[in-house]
Amino acid sequence: MIQKILIANRGEIALRVIAACKDLGIRTVAIYSQADREALHVRYADEALCIGPPRSAESYLNVPAVISAAEITDAEAIHPGYGFLAEDAAFAEVCEVSGVNFIGPRSDVIRLMGDKARARKAVAAAGVPVLPGSEGPVETEAEARKEAERIGYPVIIKAAAGGGGRGMRIVRNARELEQSFHQARHEASASFQCADVYLEKYIQRPRHIEFQVLGDQHGRVVSLGERECSIQRRHQKLLEEAPSPRVDAAMRAEIGKVLETALSRVGYSNAGTVEFLMDEDGKLYFIEMNARIQVEHPVTESVTGIDLVKAQIRIADGEPLDAILPEKIEIQGHAIECRINAENPETFAPSAGKVTKFLPPSGIGVRVETAAYSGWFVPPYYDSLLAKFIATGRDRTEAITRMKRALEMSVVEGVHTTIPLHSRIMSDEDFALGNFDTRFIEQLQQKKKAASTVG
Ligand code: MV4
């Protein structure tokens, strides 16, 4: 049995992991940078070690410092949270050889999923629907041209080591191919030290839908249904919900079943998220897999009743899914998460500074995940997520009503936040109807501009 876990993260996710550990009777070790001395994860953990200067590269990403902290404190396991070292295969491998239990998939599986071209090939071979595209990386311009003709324009060139929107080029016709291919390879090699790129049919107005999975260390994988994540800006999600207004029980069961088979075949264990695009015909196509717990995991927890972080720890401890999950996974009601970021409303740049007043919402159907408090100083070194509001209801309408109430019953002073933007989304007619795709926020901003120029 795991007795003590080191949490290699900060902010709300560090508190989320501490909560799961407390519920399991496991002791916790926090690590922190010099900028996080006043952070709540330092206060709430049983032990805390300062591991370096404010910059992530010298603290939360410093592998020797993190491993030493686990050794000094006798922590048998490390929970990486999301971001930082969560999908770093080399770090997972260092844990494996150091005899530290990394709470996540095996390092070779993280490496497989980190190579988007290989991941695509692996899941396609096991029956997961993928878009028409190249079977692996394309090495030359001639090969790219041949593949693009076969797929049919428009196509998209993606960096194999990319993901999250980095290193992509849309190619609308044969004339654009030459330049785009070389630019994509150049960018990929500069950003990821790997020039590999692959091709896919380009989907014009996709919805972004992802499936939550859990795998144990005994070869069993279970799908926990989907999340709708189309509401985003510049590849940063702003709002997620479960279930998706466009996925019915039959589609959920069908995709769930093929994912269980495919991921069991690659030896996937622990929590993971499989990303899909939905085209205008309502068909789902795999694009990539994230080998970590995600920011938006609470909406799945709300509609399934499963504590995903507790499940992650029990899986890492060798427990089978039979012992962790109910016999049948049921999706009940509806949940919406709003990401409350500290950011400048004009430039969307992170807005650091003192939170002079912080009064989070509460009440029936509202959950808040945050590490902020009145008087806390938002450091400029890390991401701008200040809080997550999660509203749950019997149905989508009730969840929206409760989210509106939560947004109205919260006070954040001293820094700008995305609260006003979320209030606008909650009152938008197309949002209420479930009519949106990944361009929704751009269109919402245009509606606002149009309204202010007409008046
Ligand atoms: C695509 C696509 C259209 N067609 N792939 C962006 C993030 C990365 N994970 C994949 N992305 C996309 N891949 C094909 N074949 C459009 C996007 C995309 C997108 C996807 C999900 C959410 C928001 C997005 C915003 C712009 C582009």
Image (cartoon, rainbow, N blue to C red):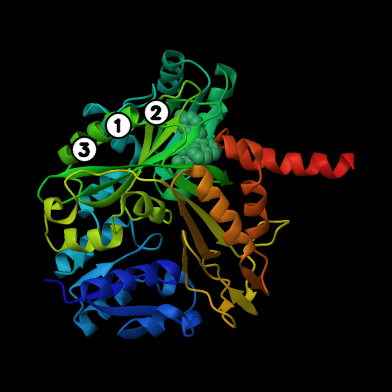
Q: Position of residue 454 (x, y in %)?
A: 88, 39
- Choose top left, top right, bottom left or bottom right for residue 76: bottom left
Residue 180's place in the image compared with 61, above or below, is above
Q: Position of residue 329 (x, y in %)?
A: 25, 44
Within-10-Å neighbours for mark 2: few <14, some 14–19, many 20+: many
Q: Earlier in the sequence, mark 1 or mark 2?
A: 1
Q: Earlier in the sequence, mark 3 or mark 2?
A: 3
Identify the image quadrant of the C terminus: top right
Look at the numbered discs 1 and 3 and tell me whether their residues touch, using CB distance below 8 Å: no
Q: Position of residue 23 (x, y in %)?
A: 26, 72
Q: Amino acid at mark 2?
A: Leu
Within-10-Å neighbours for mark 3: few <14, some 14–19, many 20+: many
Residue 125's place in the image compared with 4, above or below, is above
**SS for dot 2:** strand
Residue under pointer 3: 260
Within-10-Å neighbours for mark 1: few <14, some 14–19, many 20+: many
Q: Nearer the viewer, residue 273 or 358?
A: 358
Residue under pointer 1: 255
**Could you tell whether 152 is left or right of 303 in the image?**
right
Look at the numbered discs 1 and 2 and tell me whether their residues touch, using CB distance below 8 Å: yes
Identify the image quadrant of the N terminus: bottom left
Residue 207 visible in the picture: yes
Residue under pointer 2: 284
